Each structure stands twice: as structure tokens, then as C-alpha cells.
Image: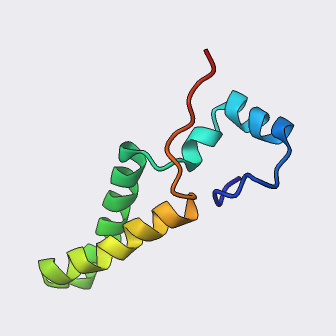
Amino acid sequence: MALGESSGAPEEVEEAFRASGSLHVFAVSGLHVGIFGLIAWLFILPMRLPRRWAVLALIPCLFGYAFITGWRPPPCAPP
């Protein structure tokens, strides 16, 4: 679940994650990408790279985050 692979998990496990609200943490939403980007930016800043190089270092980090979370949008809440 944490790495975006839920096809092998039983439905009960995924439902437990959904009910607890934990499944949403592993989704690619704008807020999560923004928070991850800010944290990565704060780690890149002390390296004193030129701004262009810092941005070029940040982009693969963001794609890596999206890849690890399975490229999935946040799950919909049941009606």
C-alpha cells in the first residue's frame, strides 16, 4: 500500500486503509506534491546550487514521489 501497489492486497486491507484515512496519504494530490517539493527544496538550498540547477534537481524528485505513490489520485470517499 505504501508504495502504490494495491493489486495484490485483499479488499479488506484496502478498505481498512481507506476507513482509517491512511490511504489518502499515499496519493498524488497537489497538496502532497507541494509539501514534498518544499521539503526537497529545503534540502537542496544548502547545496548552494544556482537556481536553474536546483529546479532541475527538484523535478526528478517530484516525479520520483509520484512514481513511488503509484501515480494515483486521491481515493474517492464512498457515498
Left or right: 42, with 52 as reference point: right
Query: In which quadrant of the rendered view does residue 19 lie?
Result: top right
Q: Name the one closer to the observer, 68 or 39.
A: 68
Report the residue at 19% width, 85% height from top. Answer: 49
Report the residue at 65% width, 60% height from top. Answer: 3
Left or right: 21, with 34 as reference point: right
Relative image position of residue 17 (x, y in whole percent): 72, 38
Q: Name the one closer to the observer, 3 or 50.
A: 3
Above or below, comparing residue 72 to residue 21 in the picture: below
| Direction top: furthest residue | 79
Query: In which quadrant of the rendered view does residue 10 lie?
Result: top right
Left or right: 28, with 1 as reference point: left
Relative image position of residue 36 (x, y in whole percent): 40, 58
Q: Name the one closer to the observer, 28 or 40.
A: 28
Relative image position of residue 42 (x, y in whole percent): 30, 66
Q: Quadrant of the C terminus?
A: top right
Above or below, comparing residue 27 to residue 58 in the picture: above
Report the residue at 82% width, 55% height from top. Answer: 8
Q: How many marks?
A: 0
Relative image position of residue 41 (x, y in whole percent): 29, 67
Color theme of the render: rainbow
Above or below, comparing residue 60 to residue 20 in the picture: below
Report the residue at 47% width, 50% height from top. Answer: 28
